[in-house]
Image (cartoon, grey):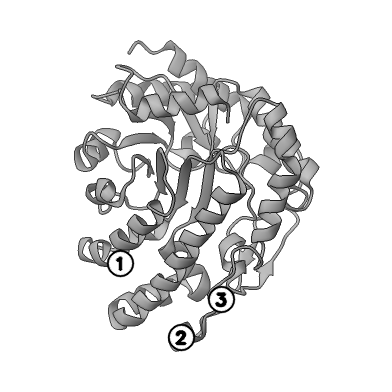
C-alpha cells in the first residue's frame, strides 16, 4: 500500500470526502494464484511467485486499493497451525486445518501458542522480512496486522457445529477457549507491529460472528474483539464479516471498528443505519454471482445501481460484499472501475 492510498483510506474513514470514489478490494489466496496463472501451492511456497502475483495485481489495477496489501498468509491454516492443527495442502485448491479439539475437555489442554515460533507464523513474518526491501522500493509499505477473529479460529480448532453447541451448552468452556484465542490474537497482532513498525492498521476477519444472536454477540463477541482491536494503537480498525452482519453492526463502534466489510445481502443504507456515522463501510456488490460470474456489462450496471442506491456516500469504499473470490476476470474488475468513474455522485 502506498502512502497516498493509506491517506485516501483515512480520508474516507474520517468522512472528509462528500462523495467518495475510492475503490478497495480484499485480495488473498482464493483469487490471486488463479488470476495470475500459478498454482495455489506455488503461491504459498514460493516467495517469488507470491510477490509477482501481488505486484501484477497492483500494476494491472492502479485505481484499486488492495487490502490489506501484500498479505502474507497460508489460507485458513494460518492461525490454527499455531495451536498444533495439522495442515492439509492441495495444488490448486485452498488448504484446510484438521481439528485439535475433539471433546470440550480438550480446551483445558490447548497450548498457548508462542507467536514468534509456532506453526506457520514464523514463515509469514520471514516472507515479509525477506521481501520488505523490494516492497518498499516499489513505493509500498506494510500497513496492516492481519488475523482471523476468535470465533473463526475456534471453529477451525473444533468445528463450526461443535463450537456453536459449546456456546449454548457449556458457555464457561466457550469463554475459556475464546480467552486463550484472544490472548493469542493480541500477542500475534503486537508481534506483527514489532516486526514491521510501519503497521498502523488491523484487519480482523471473523464470519462466525454472523452465526450468533444479539445476546450471544454481546457476550461472546464484543469483549473479545474489542480487546483485539485495542492490542496496538491504530488508525484503521478493519473488520470483515460477510456472513449475517445485522447482528454485529450496532456493536461496531463499541468494539473499536471504524471500517466494516459485510455481506452483499445487506444494503449499504441498512448497515449505515445500524452502525452509525462513525464507521466507514466497504462493499457490497455480490462477489460470486455478479463480480465473478457476471458479464462485464452486468458488473458495470450492478455497480452503477449499487452506488446510486446509497444515500450517504461520504464514508464508503466501493467494493464487493467480501473478498474477491476465485475466477474473477480482469475484464470484470475493469468494468467495476469504469462504473465508479462514470457515475455522477
- Do the CB atoms of the residues marked 3 and 1 lie less than 8 Å apart? no
- Mark whose residue sits in front, 3 or 1: 1
Of the 4 image quadrants, the one containing the N terminus is top right
Q: Residues within 10 Å of mark 1 (few under 14, many from 20)?
A: many
Q: CA distance from mark 3 to mark 1?
A: 21 Å
> Which quarter of the picture shows residue 69?
top right
Residue 36 visible (yes or no): no
First in sequence: mark 3 or mark 1?
A: 3
Query: Residue 212 placed where, x, y %?
Result: 30, 63
Q: Nearer the viewer, residue 77 or 92?
A: 77
Query: Residue 244 placed where, x, y %?
Result: 33, 52
Of the 4 image quadrants, the one containing the C terminus is top left
Q: Which residue is mark 3?
A: 99
Mark seen at residue 249: none
Q: Which residue is mark 2?
A: 108
**Drawn side of residue 141 relative to residue 248, left or right:** right
**Drawn side of residue 2 relative to residue 38, left or right:** left
Q: Residues within 10 Å of mark 3 (few under 14, many from 20)?
A: some
Q: Which residue is mark 1?
A: 220
Query: Residue 183 placed where, x, y %?
Result: 45, 67
- Identify the residue shown where x is 74% and y is 33%: 134
First in sequence: mark 2 or mark 1?
A: 2
Q: SS class of the residue under badge 3?
A: loop
Give above or below for 274 relative to 208. Answer: above
Q: CA distance from mark 2 to mark 1?
A: 18 Å
How many labels sit on residues?
3
- Identify the residue shown where x is 79% and y is 48%: 46
> Which quarter of the picture shows residue 28?
top right
Amino acid at each position: 500500500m502506498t502512502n497516498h492510498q493509506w491517506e485516501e483510506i483515512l480520508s474516507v474513514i474520517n468522512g472528509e470526502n462528500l462523495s467518495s470514489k475510492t475503490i478497495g478490494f480484499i485480495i488473498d489466496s482464493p483469487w490471486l494464484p488463479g488470476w495470475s496463472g500459478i498454482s495455489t501451492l506455488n503461491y504459498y511456497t514460493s516467495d517469488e511467485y507470491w510477490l509477482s502475483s501481488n505486484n501484477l495485481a497492483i500494476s494491472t489495477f492502479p485505481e484499486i486499493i488492495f487490502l490489506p496489501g501484500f498479505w502474507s498468509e497460508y489460507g485458513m491454516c494460518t492461525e490454527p497451525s499455531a495451536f498444533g492443527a495439522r495442515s492439509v495442502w492441495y495444488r490448486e485448491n485452498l488448504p484446510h486445518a484438521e481439528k485439535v479439539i475433539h471433546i470440550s475437555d480438550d480446551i483445558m489442554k490447548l497450548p498457548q501458542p508462542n507467536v514468534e515460533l509456532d506453526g506457520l507464523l514464523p514463515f509469514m513474518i520471514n516472507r515479509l522480512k525477506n521481501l520488505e526491501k523490494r516492497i518498499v522500493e516499489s513505493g509500498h509499505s506494510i500497513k496492516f496486522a492481519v488475523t482471523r477473529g476468535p470465533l473463526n479460529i475456534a471453529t477451525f480448532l473444533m468445528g463450526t457445529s461443535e463450537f456453536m453447541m459449546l456456546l449454548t451448552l457449556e458457555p464457561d468452556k466457550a469463554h475459556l477457549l475464546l480467552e486463550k484465542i484472544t490472548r493469542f490474537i493480541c500477542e500475534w497482532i503486537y508481534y506483527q507491529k514489532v516486526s514491521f513498525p510501519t503497521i498502523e492498521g488491523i484487519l480482523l476477519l471473523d464470519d462466525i460472528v454472523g452465526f450468533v444472536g444479539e445476546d450471544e454477540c454481546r457476550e461472546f463477541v464484543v469483549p473479545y474483539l474489542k480487546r483485539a482491536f485495542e492490542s496496538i494503537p491504530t488508525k484503521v480498525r478493519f473488520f470483515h464479516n460477510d456472513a449475517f452482519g445485522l447482528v454485529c453492526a450496532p456493536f461496531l463502534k463499541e468494539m473499536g471498528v471504524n471500517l466494516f466489510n459485510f455481506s452483499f445481502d445487506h444494503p449499504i443504507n441498512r448497515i449505515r443505519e445500524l452502525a452509525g456515522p462513525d464507521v466507514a463501510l466497504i462493499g457490497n456488490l455480490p462477489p460470486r454471482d455478479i463480480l465473478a460470474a457476471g458479464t462485464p456489462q452486468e458488473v458495470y450496471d450492478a455497480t452503477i445501481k449499487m452506488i446510486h442506491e446509497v444515500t450517504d456516500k461520504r464514508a464508503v469504499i466501493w467494493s464487493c460484499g467480501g473478498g474477491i473470490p476465485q475466477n474473477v476476470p480482469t475484464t470484470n474488475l475493469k468494468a467495476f472501475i469504469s462504473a465508479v468513474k462514470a457515475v455522477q455522485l
